[in-house]
Image: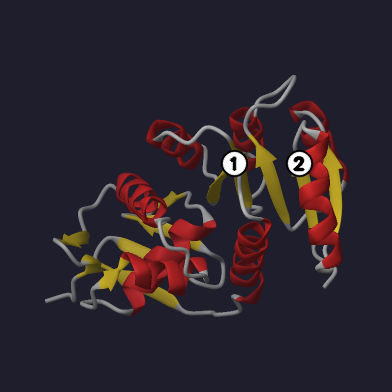
Amino acid sequence: MDKKILIIEDEAAIQKILSEPLTFAGYNVTAVSDGLEGINEFHRQKFDLILLDIMLPKIDGYTVCEMVRQESQIPIILLTALDTEDDQIKGFDKLADDYITKPFSIKLVLKRVEALLRRTSSNMATDIICYKEITLSEAERQVYVSGNEVALTHLEFEILLLFLKNRGRVFTRDDLLNLVWGYDFMGDEKGVNFHIMNLRKKLNVDYIETVRGVGYKIAREN
């Protein structure tokens, strides 16, 4: 598999709970215990994904995420005991790709890691998609609105890509969990709502419609 994962987690027991199954699954795992060490390790090696605790010594996880995002679009999954809506929104505002609350199922972590890595490594498309003010480059994974580049997380990009390729189709939250996240995890629909909200805010154009009681869509152009 040869995929390299950086775990930034200050609790030794949780490091072990994460490292051993990921190593057994074929990943090359590096684990560090504070935010500063995490940033230093990120600069020393090329990783494919980061599992990042929020409550860290020296530099907290939100700041680590922000610092990494200034240099890289590497997938980041936040791991934390902070489970309020405001905490999750703050994580997505820092451009994290996913958010898992403690205590967590290691099977869930493995599934989300697998799904996120599959999405980020398999995209070899070359198409340019245009919709009103939006221009999306699937190959370069870039989005422009009225000529200005908009920085999206991997999940936000995949959601927008799905909508633009299927204009007029209504996607339920379960559809998005299966098609974008790559797994069916009941009870995680709040994450969909957060990503849609952040995507709308970043695009700053009102094209993602809420279909009450059903889901979301982007309308066909007239």
Q: Amino acid at mark 2?
A: Ile
Q: In front here: 134 or 181?
A: 181
Q: What numbered label is drawn on residue 14?
A: 2
Q: Quadrant of residue 59?
A: top right
Residue at horizontal 48 percent and vertical 36 percent from the top: 83
| Residue that label 1 marks | 102
**Is 48 situated left or right of 66 in this image?**
right
**Is 121 situated left or right of 98 in this image?**
right
Q: What numbered label is drawn on residue 71?
A: none
Residue at horizontal 75 percent and vertical 39 percent from the top: 8
- Expressed as whole percent of the image width and height from the top left, the position of residue 31 reads 84, 43
Q: State which quarter of the image contains the C terminus.
A: bottom left
Cβ–Cβ under 8 Å for marks 2 and 1: yes
- Expressed as whole percent of the image width and height from the top left, the position of residue 157 reads 46, 61
**Could you tell me if residue 175 is visible in this image?**
yes
Q: Secondary structure at mark 1?
A: loop
Q: Amino acid at mark 1?
A: Lys
Q: Quadrant of residue 109?
A: bottom right
**Could you tell me if residue 43 is visible in this image?**
no
Q: In front here: 4 or 183?
A: 183
Q: Secondary structure at mark 2?
A: helix
Relative to 51, does residue 135 appear above or below in the rendering?
A: below
| Mark closest to the chain's N terminus, 2 or 1 | 2
Residue at horizontal 65 percent and vertical 25 percent from the top: 60
- Expressed as whole percent of the image width and height from the top left, the position of residue 70 reads 62, 39
